[in-house]
Image (cartoon, grey):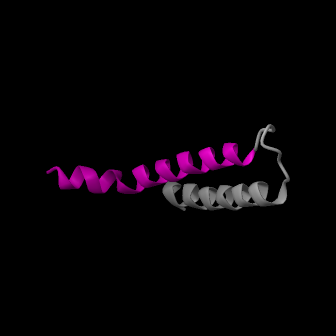
């Protein structure tokens, strides 16, 4: 399986974990919400997947 596809599946898993952490935990406004950690990791993984998927297409369009 290609790396960008594996990163996409990992991003979907992080998305599910983010929703689970955000909605299943009662967090006061003063406590740290761990859903932010998985959310930021999810965004980074999706961005890396997007760049890897489009890297070849960007180099072909410049020629």
* Near-viewer residue (62 or 33): 33
Q: Is residue 15 left or right of residue 1?
A: right
Residue at the left extreme of this rendering: 63
Q: Position of residue 62 (x, y in %)?
A: 17, 50
Q: Give the magenta part as a residue range.
A: 34-63
| Above or below for 31 versus 56 | above
The question of residue 24 being in magenta is answered with no
Residue at image position (75%, 55%) is: 22
Q: Position of residue 52 (x, y in %)?
A: 42, 51
* Near-viewer residue (46 or 35): 35
Which image quadrant for residue 30?
A: top right
Image label count: 0
Which image quadrant for residue 23?
A: bottom right
Quadrant where the image shows the N terminus: bottom right
Q: Position of residue 13 (x, y in %)?
A: 68, 60
| Above or below for 41 versus 6 | above
* Near-viewer residue (2 or 57): 57
Residue at image position (73%, 57%) is: 17
Q: Is residue 59 left or right of residue 49?
A: left
Q: Is residue 6 left or right of residue 54?
A: right
Q: Position of residue 6 (x, y in %)?
A: 58, 58
* Near-viewer residue (46 or 29): 29
The question of residue 46 being in magenta is answered with yes
Residue at image position (83%, 48%) is: 27
Type of secondary structure dominating the magenta stretch: helix
């Amino acid at each position: 399986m290609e790396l960008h596809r594996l990163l996409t599946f990992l991003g979907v898993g992080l998305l599910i974990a983010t929703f689970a952490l955000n909605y299943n935990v009662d967090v006061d406004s003063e406590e740290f919400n761990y859903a932010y950690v998985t959310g930021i990791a999810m965004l980074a993984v999706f961005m890396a997947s997007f760049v890897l998927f489009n890297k070849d297409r960007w180099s072909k369009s410049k020629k």
